Image: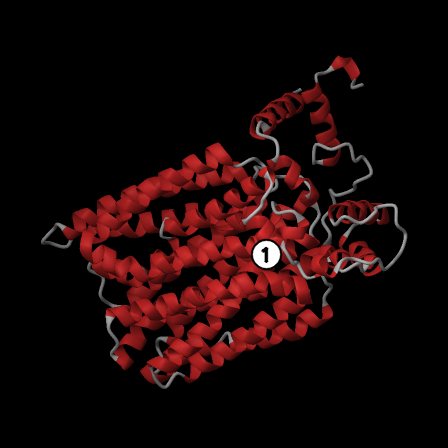
Amino acid sequence: MCPGQETNVQCQCQRAMKDGSGHNNEDYSLTKFNNYACACVVAASIISAIFGYSTGVMAGALLYIKEELRISDLQVQLLAGILNACALPGSLLAGRISDIIGRRNTIILSSIIFLLGSILMGYGPNYSALMAGRCTAGIGAGFALMIAPVYSAEISSPSYRGFLTALPDVSINLGLLLGYVSNYFFGRLPLQIGWRTMLFVPAFPSLALAILMLKLVESPRWLVMQGRIGDAREVLMRVSNTKQEAEQRLQEIKTAAGIDPRSTQDIVQVPKRSRSGGGALRELLCNPSPPVRRILIAATGVHLFQQIIGIEAIFMYTPRIFERTGITDKSVLLLATVGMGISDAVFVLISTFLLDRVGRRILLLVSSGGVAVSLLGLGACMRIVEHSDDKVSWAISFTIVFTYIYVAFTAIGLGPVTWVYSSEIFPLRLRAQGLGVGVTVNRFTNVVVVTSFISIYQKITMAGIFFMYTAITALAWCFYYSFLPETKGRSLEDMESIFGKTNDINNNKQVKHVINGYNNA
């Protein structure tokens, strides 16, 4: 009984203040940051940086590719969108493959695929070779987008999982920035050399990552799924701060995997179907329980709305958007794009420190609200520019400013939280393939947005497409507010029960209210 006859909610708050999760796990020492776990996640996040670079560098490279190869706007859209089109089968395959060969080996495989794609694009004698290289890199992108968040979530403890699981998205945005910087500097080289150098650069980190990952640990949760309890215990000892914490995490993982937590064997027999993830997609799509159905809707919803608000199209076509305002000098266009990359990188880094303090749900609400306002301002400025016969300097300046604000609000919530949230909510048996489904929705939506952006704005004007994105973002805000429970500080093994409670959001609000009361006291 809690002192002073507090209510059940107050008791829950006191327990939450002890272990950060709302559970009575007083021995669960998760407050100290583990440097080795962070090192593993940082290394794995290199694959995300390679994907980010491949996306960002194409924004500027397209200007030079179009000039040398003399391709049409339709071919430009196809070249921009083929990476994400090929990421669709890549993300679905990655889920099942990672259940079979492991998370670490899947990252290595993704690195090798990126290496091959970069070599093909760097060679790039013609449009067909470019498409082949971009398609190969796209398959690697599908693997990268699925596996980096899963590996990060499964390595991390609950108290700093938000920070570590956000690192792959931080890396994507740093990669985007490096891609824009690469555009600016390599664009000064002779035409035939400059854009090919831009596209070849990812070959070097891809090769380095494939070698580095051989030295790092496998996911302890995947090891438990294979029945390798002894190996999982060794990994948990390295990524936990105490032996007691490692044992506590191991017991929870064993329970989630359907293994007797009292078993002391280092190797246990696990059905082959469970080891390889067999039946996971069937359970997800054909016969889900109510909590799993809600998890699936939440995961696919956050991925759908992350892309359908147009973020990738704006990243990809920023030079063209600024060109529509009257800026024609290529160096100025690319420099303005670098500024957007800096805004993105700074705010996504800020987001990583807020995820475990503020929570996932609040960041999504703040982010989508800010995105809607900035898109409205962007649309208004573009409308003035497009309907004016003279050059309106202030409208041009505000178009750039609103673009930076839009990117900043996306980076502080919609960007990183989508990956953190979707990688942590699926049960262990469904996690890899469940996230694969989410990534497939993400990439499919991305392909539709990127390959249709030019065609749509030519029909309804640039201002019209931004007003359209504003309405979609308002719908996204309603979805986040009404459907997503908070997951901050909860263990991965708790997620199915969280989504099984229809009043979880209200309970969280009540808990937060009482915690604030204790803090104020």
**Quadrant location of the N terminus in the rendered image:** top right
The x, y position of residue 189, in whole percent, is 36, 81
Looking at the rendering, in which quadrant would you find the C terminus? top right
Residue 62 percent coordinates (x, y): 32, 71
Q: Quadrant of residue 476?
A: top left
Q: Is residue 136 left or right of residue 75?
A: right
From the top left corner, tell me how far across and down residue 477 is, in percent. 42, 37
The residue depicted at 37 percent of the width and 42 percent of the height is 473
**Residue 448 falls in image quadrant:** bottom left
Residue with the most extreme right position: 264
Of residues 172 and 97, the one nearer the viewer is: 97
483 or 112, nearer to the observer = 483
Q: Tell me if residue 139 comes above or below residue 255 in the rendering.
A: below
Q: Amino acid at mark 1?
A: Gln
**Lateral position of residue 508 relative to residue 5, left or right:** left
Q: Residues within 10 Å of mark 1 (few under 14, many from 20)?
A: many
One can see residue 489 in this view: no
Q: How many marks?
A: 1
Observer able to see residue 24: yes
Q: Dot 1: what SS? A: helix
Q: Residue furthest left?
A: 389
User: Which residue, given by chain and number where applicable, does mark 1 sit on?
Assistant: 433
Q: Is residue 462 above or below residue 44?
A: above
Percent across and percent down for residue 308 are 38, 50
Residue 116's place in the image compared with 250, above or below, is below
Residue placed furthest toward the top: 4
Q: Nearer the viewer, residue 15 or 275?
A: 275
Q: Is residue 112 left or right of residue 428?
A: left
Asked which colour scheme the image uses, the reply is: secondary structure
